[in-house]
Amino acid sequence: MIFNSIEFAIFLPIVFLLYWTGKRYIPKSQNYVLLVASYFFYGWWDYRFLALIFASSLVDYIVARRILHSESKKKKNSLLCLSLLMNLGMLAYFKYANFFIDSFIDSFSLIGFNFNVDSLELILPVGISFYTFQTLSYTIDVWKGQLRPINDAVAFFSFVSFFPQLVAGPIERAENLLPQFLEDKKFNYNDSAEGLKQILWGLFKKVVIADNCAYYANQIFESYGDHSGGVLLLGGVLFAFQIYGDFSGYSDIAIGTSKLFGFHLKINFNFPYFSKGISEFWKRWHISLSTWFRDYVYIPLGGSKNGRWVHIRNIMIVFLVSGLWHGANWTFVVWGAFHGLLFIPAMYLRGSALETALNKTFIIRTFRNSVVFLLVTLLWVFFRSQNVGDAFQYLGKIFDLNGKWIKDLYNYLYWNDMLEICILLFVFILIEYIQQGRQIVLQFKFLDKYAFIRWTLYYSVLFCILLLGAKQQDFIYFQF
């Protein structure tokens, strides 16, 4: 079940009514409603996936409680290893088995050995990368002694499977989200109103911005050999807005939907394309994943301690693992590696006199912002391409500044009647620029006193969604 579907439009109000009215008749029924609704939501794709999320939840629920009652450090470590083996093993099998098999075959073929090994017929469970990381962080925090395990099994299973953020995040920490399942929830009108605004803006980003950009980006990437550099750069820019609108739109809908039920999730995107450096970009993009890798990979490896080269090694490991997390393809590993190489000098410049000088004027800051956006856009080519070779060929054509570069770009824009998408992107960028720093983009302070204008804005956004939402595309991050 996807957020921008008729099924979800029917499902959400039903769950909302059952959640808030059921507690009048059955005390503490809310978590049961959420658990059943979440399993129904997840099973809508394939009911067989429910066994995996149930197994992951059960193992970590039991392991965490056993860790608490274990006095032996060796036993605690063994229990943690059991959780890691279960979760990472399940993730590795379903997501990376074919990748490792193919890489093994390709490696030996380079030295003349050829193997005929069939790929496994595996279906990647939706959202497995997200919920395994969420439940793993719970067990690790209990093992560290930073969190006390929960006794309420229904609350824990609801935490792992919470349907608004189950499939594509944000990856919530137990310390933030789990206690909210133990609260006695009371309906809050302001929370619900804010949630609906956030859902509306998330749908706009997904259906209007991401899906319309995807329509043209897919055409360009699938026939990149027929285009010159100007058109290919346009394809990269369109994909940059596609993936941002798609993923941050999902996060907005997830956060907004959670508010309808009285839950508050952490912000996952903070206007990343207005960053003035790569290190700042990674503080604003997919924040829940970045902080997860910081706390559970980077810091355990030693972080910035033990000298500069160890520090650099730790950064590169995090970015390589982050790239592989996104997909079983070398394109993602290369994408992560390049981001790591850009991140290292940016990190060492942070707080320096040079960086201070580069922030002095609006023009310089805007130039820095433009350079960062261009670098991020060029690296998205690896993320979007089928293989590393295609990505390098695509980038090579962008940097081939021949006489057709501008002419072909103009012709493509003209013959594909792209004025509409250009206007949409301009308005979208302008609104996000004005609303930087606000979690709810559609909440304009100066409109608080003007109800008519405020509601006109909401209905205009809704009208755009209904009018321009015909080019429906799957959420990109469902494949991760």
Image (tube, helix red, strand yellow):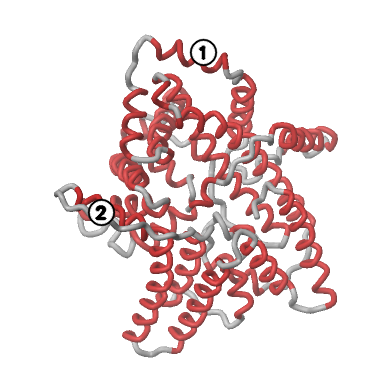
Where does label 1 land, which residue? 411
Disc on res. 234 = none
The residue mark sitting in front, 2 or 1, is: 2
Amino acid identity at mark 2: Ile
Left or right of 263 in this view: 192: right
> What x and y, as percent, mark residue 355?
35, 34
User: How many numbered circles are shown?
Assistant: 2
For label 2, the SS is helix
Residue in the foreground of this view, choosing between 101 and 231: 101
> What x and y, as percent, mark residue 412?
52, 17
Give the residue at x 49% y 61%.
128
> What x and y, as percent, mark residue 67?
43, 83
Above/below status of 348 relative to 165: above
Left or right of 198 in this view: 298: left
Q: Which residue is at the far left?
A: 111
Q: Are marks 2 and 1 in contact (CB under 8 Å)?
A: no
> What x and y, as percent, mark residue 193?
76, 50
Left or right of 43 in this view: 72: left
* Circle 1 Cα neighbour tier, 10 Å, few/some/many (<14 / 14–19 / ≥20): few
* Circle 2 Cα neighbour tier, 10 Å, few/some/many (<14 / 14–19 / ≥20): some
Dividing the picture into quadrants, the one containing residue 339 is: top left
Q: CA distance from mark 2 to mark 1?
A: 44 Å
Residue in the foreground of this view, choosing between 287 and 423: 423
Above/below status of 177 relative to 401: below
Residue in the foreground of this view, choosing between 57 and 286: 57
Where does label 2 land, which residue? 105
Dividing the picture into quadrants, the one containing residue 12 is: bottom right
Give the residue at x 76% y 63%.
15
Above/below status of 353 relative to 421: below
For label 1, the SS is helix
Amino acid identity at mark 1: Asn
